[in-house]
Amino acid sequence: MSVCLESSNKRYAPLALALFDNKKQKGIFVFCCIVIFFLSLWKIYADYQTYLSNTNYEIIAQVKSQYTKIKNQREYFVLRVQDTKGYYFYITSFLDLKSLVNREIRIYGKMKQCSFFEFLKSCYFSAYNIALMPQEGFKAKLQDFIDKQHQDIRHSMLYRALFFADSLSKEYRDRVNALGIAHLVAISGFHLGILSALLFFIFQPIYGFFHKRYFTYRNRIYDLSAMVLFCMFLYLILLDFQASFLRAFVMSVFGFLLFFGNMRIFSFEMLFVIVGCILAVFPRLVFNVGFVLSVSGVFYIFLILRHFPKMPWYLWIIAFNSSIFFLMGIIVHFYFPYFSFYQYFSMVLSVLFVVFFPLMLFLHTIFLGGIFDSFLDLFLIMQFRVIEFYTPWFLLVSYVLLSFFAIFSKKCFYVLLACSICFYCYLSYLFLA
């Protein structure tokens, strides 16, 4: 492992300033994060005691997923819901329920005994009564606007997942997992980047007209970036502060401030600071799979930017896309076991998505969102053979440690990349066996 500790050349602008000047400042930051983290945990614990102490309790929650189970030859529904405070619960019902996914319901019941650690993830809520809430608000109107453009509710759920971070139907979820494109459907920094570029492209000529005539002294890039970030903040509110998009937005704001403060942007120090700040305020995100995968994705992007050699732009795009695919594999398979040969096409689909996402957003804006539904019908008919393989603990821990060593060593980075490629070779062998 000593070879992995060799220093690599740092690619920073010569005048870029460090985020912290000395170890004392780093220590103060860590101390502040720890204090805020425990204060946030104390607030969550107070909510936990409130749920436990009440004999009966009423909550308003959104249904995140719904599926059936069988017990004593009786079929019943299991609903995973998120209340207005952001806590997750599981409830069951023997009623003949229609699909309630993404709808708000009023639940009257009592939370079963569970530990505080379990409460940070999810607990069982014994529901005595369930009532469907009316669809109200601006977001509900937008969702209804999407629904009216599709005859098949499964298609509208796909686009609501793309635009509003709603849940997918089981049919789409199975096929998305088989193709390995969950990162395209789940809103994250990738979507923020596409939307930001689109808004920048739209705002630039409008702002440029007024900039040339009335306030040429203003920094055009600064003002346009601020306008785009403000729009993204409104979108974040619309998404109810969805975890991976929240991470991406905070990084964007922080990067914006660092850029105009002439400080290093693409640094691991910046990433760790942002993750520390977010977890200090929202401790439960440590159990959020979307947040963990989102942070991991940015981490490996930074590794690639740090160690990849210079090459023609078209080769760089191919190398970048394929490297991200392989590097994320071991982490992803710790949470999601599905693998098929079709997942290799996700590298191409990721590039095409840059065009597909804004195109479908535009088509839905002019009420032509259902124009490709016939192709989606064919997609739902298709069957994909998959195998299941979970990343074992020892491999995950070793891979994460090697990833941190790769920050300081180019050789370690290429060892990491080789390990991830070997992992997919092994999955391919299992698939063919």
Image (spheres, helix red, strand yellow):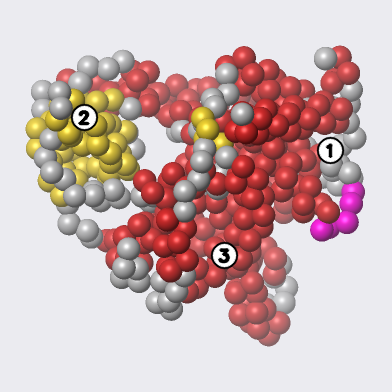
- Extent of the magenta region: 310-314
Circle 1 or circle 3, nearest the eye: 3
Q: Quadrant of residue 292?
A: top right
Q: Is residue 311 magenta?
A: yes
- Front residue of 397/99: it is 99
Query: In the visual, does 40 lie left or right of 218?
Result: left
Residue at 51% from the left image edge and 30% from the top image edge: 388
* Residue 331 screen position, x and y as percent: 60, 30
Secondary structure of residue under mark 3: helix
Tell me the residue that label 3 is attached to: 356
Residue under circle 1? 307
**Camera-side mark, 2 or 1:** 2
Which residue bears the numbered disc 2?
Answer: 70
Relative to 128, residue 139 above or below: below
Residue 104 visible in image: no
Q: Nearer the viewer, residue 393 or 390?
A: 390
Amino acid at circle 3: Phe
Q: Residues within 10 Å of mark 3 (few under 14, many from 20)?
A: few
Figure quadrant of the N terminus: top right
- Queried whether the magenta region covers residue 59, the answer comes back as no
